[in-house]
Amino acid sequence: MRAVLPPTGLVVVVGVLAVVGVEWFPAHTPAAAELRRDPIEDDPAARPALEAADREADEVVRHAPRGGKIHLYWDAKKQLLKEKHGIEWRSPAEMNPGWFFD
């Protein structure tokens, strides 16, 4: 691997990294067990409404750009659950302040 300094002053690294098992994430990433979720998701009576909202939210964000798409999805799901089913649902971002989702 070698660094190339183009005329603009930017450093461009040319080469291939062939290391396996390198951790590319911050030192502490959330495990599924660590993330809090809205307790309504464990209510069997709410499951049909949650599944319907998931399907509809998928359609809402189908053509949205990738970056931050999960927040659009959660916003749509939250609104659909509130308006159509009277369910106050909290997104993983709301349930886990301090964690960043993209």
Image (cartoon, grey):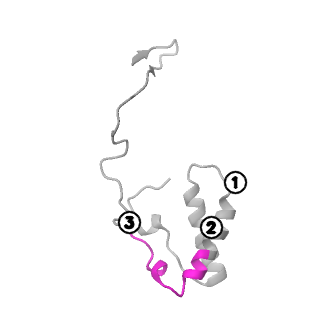
Q: Which residues are magenta?
A: 36-51
Alpha-carbon distance for marks 1 and 3? 27 Å
Task: Return the x and y of residue 91 as percentages of the image width and height.
Answer: 50, 69
Q: Which residue is mark 3?
A: 35
Q: Which mark is residue 63?
A: 1
| Residue at point 33%, 42% (across, down) | 23
Q: Say how many tags the image has.
A: 3
Q: Is residue 5 above or below residue 65?
A: above
| In-image side of 75 versus 35 (left or right) | right
In primary-sequence order, the first of circles 1 and 3 is 3
Image point (48%, 81%), residue name = 40
SS for dot 1: loop
The amino acid type of the residue labelled 3 equals Leu
62 inside magenta stretch: no
- Circles 1 and 3: CB distance less than 8 Å? no
Residue 43 is covered by the magenta coloring: yes
For the N terminus, give its image quadrant. top left
The mark that comes first in sequence, 2 or 3, is 3
Going by the numbered disc 2, the residue's amino acid type is Ala
Residue 14 in the image: above or below residue 7: below
Is label 2 or label 3 in front?
A: 3
Q: How many residues crowd around disc 1 within 10 Å: few (fewer than 14), some, or many (20 or more)? A: few
Tell me the mark number nearer the camera, choosing from 2 and 1: 1
Kindly identify the amino acid type of the residue bearing the numbered disc 1.
His
Residue 60, percent across and down?
68, 63
Q: Earlier in the sequence, mark 2 or mark 1?
A: 1
